[in-house]
Image (cartoon, rainbow, N blue to C red):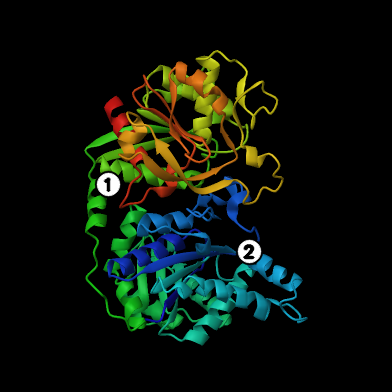
Amino acid sequence: MQTKYIFVTGGVSSSLGKGIISASLAKLLQARGFSVTIQKFDPYINVDPGTLNPYEHGECYVTDDGAETDLDLGHYERFLNVPTSQANNVTTGRIYQTVINKERAGDYLGKTVQVVPHITDEIKRRFCLLGETEEYEIIISEIGGTVGDIESLPYVEAMRQMRWELGAVDCMVIHLTYIPYLSAAKELKTKPTQHSVKVLLSSGVQPDILVCRTEHPLSLSIRKKLALFCNVELSSVIEAIDADTIYDVPLLMLKEKLDKTVLKKFKLKSKQDPELTQWKTFLGKLKNPLREVNIGLVGKYNELQDAYKSIYESFIHAGAVNECKVHVKPIHSEQITDENVYDVLKNLDGILVAPGFGERGINGKIIAIQYVREHNIPFFGICLGMQCAVVEFAQNVLDIDDAASTEVDEHTPHPVIDIMEEQKNITQLGGTMRLGSYKCELKKRSHAYKAYQNTSINERHRHRYEFNDYYEKQLAEKGMIATGVNPKSGLVEIVEIKDHPWFVGVQFHPELKSTVENPHPLFVHFIKAAMENS
């Protein structure tokens, strides 16, 4: 069949949840038997979010093929249980970079290079790239930002051209908007949505479906008003009421018949009744836990929860498997000292030390790790968290007081964590780390092996510094064992303490592979250990 294209735009306000709506619609279409993928188009000029501070843009999500992408791709994978790739995230920076490189190469034969048609043509090419593989029947493209933003204009124009070229049967626009509730007047207001649609119309784009975020149910009269003044069918006004959890949204959209409306406009018949048994089972366990645990998340970007988005979601997945409510307590590592560590970490059943970059907050992480190691509290360290665990063990168990990572102290005489050899001569920061999926071989009789039930795994990476294997034997003699190693490079991927109930540090990012249907085994077993400790 001809690939169908759906564009999801946002209006009135940012942070309405275009990614969740896109992922929910994709999940429903997938449940009806269609092959679906989602791509994100971001209007910023960075080539990718890899150089962005987490405070700016939340976490940087890494795919198997090593793309540094927007965090919405995490939602896509968690909902669809299908890996994304470099092609699923495109920025304005990448678009302009491609066009400028072509201009420098003389590809435009001396023509004046302009936003229309050259930039818009490149955007359209990217819109269609995944469709050309014939692997997907429906492609959903989420357009970042809010309509009316200067940055989004080329994308809206490219979208208008796509709709004109393909027609309504193969291309549609879903506009996510907001219906505010004025408590003084005690009523919902449609005017912001009307104005948002007018902005789209002024660019030549008529939305086919309105998805309306709201804190209160939309009455029939409100729906009729929106349909009339926004020029859409009544059945195309979809209520997206605030939900307890993002995982409720697919079922809410099913109730609102969003998927049926899309298929009707595409003149497609459902291949099967929606198969959502596993999803509903997950939700049932999520909402009816039998136990509770308290987990401390020690990091340095805690002010913005999106900085650790995949970790929070992984805890939700692992908690549901264990029928356990996971209460995550964010703890800022800069606020942990030798004097207050007991008060900060008391009453916690487990500690996760989060990834990050730079020396800020390192001392607090090391103090926290020493406390949980000495008090037999389950510990999970990810990337920098694993590296801090090695530094702490070297300092306090091997008695190497000046052991450090060269990221923190480049002149340390004992670099137990050192910059990777291939990274030493790299000066450009963007896209130059060790990125993507790499193999790891596990030792049997380890916590990692018990979790994976496999001796060979593949996990995603994003780092420049690594475990210095010069110290591997010394650490092992005192009880810190390398239980996971890359078979090709010899890079130590996992360390554990053998006489501790559950102490695991990993160089990779397991949170990036946890989905509703396949919760990550390390998170599942970490929560089990925390339950046993509670």
Write the residue at 32% across / 49% down: 518
From the viewer's side, name the closer residue of 29 and 219: 29
Where is residue 115? Give x, y as percent: 68, 76
Vertical arrangement, residue 232 with respect to residue 83, above or below: below
| Mark 2, residue position | 94
Residue 215's image quarter? Answer: bottom left
Where is residue 89? Give x, y as percent: 53, 62
Write the residue at 56% across / 76% down: 124
Q: Which quarter of the rendering shows the C terminus?
A: top left
Q: CA distance from mark 2 to mark 1?
A: 39 Å
Q: Of the two numbered discs 2 and 1 on the same chain, state the one appearing first in sequence.
A: 2
Residue 377's image quarter? Answer: top left
| Mark 1, residue position | 286
Nearer the observer: mark 2 or 1; the answer is 2
Write the residue at 59% across / 53% down: 49
Vertical arrangement, residue 485 with respect to residue 477, above or below: below
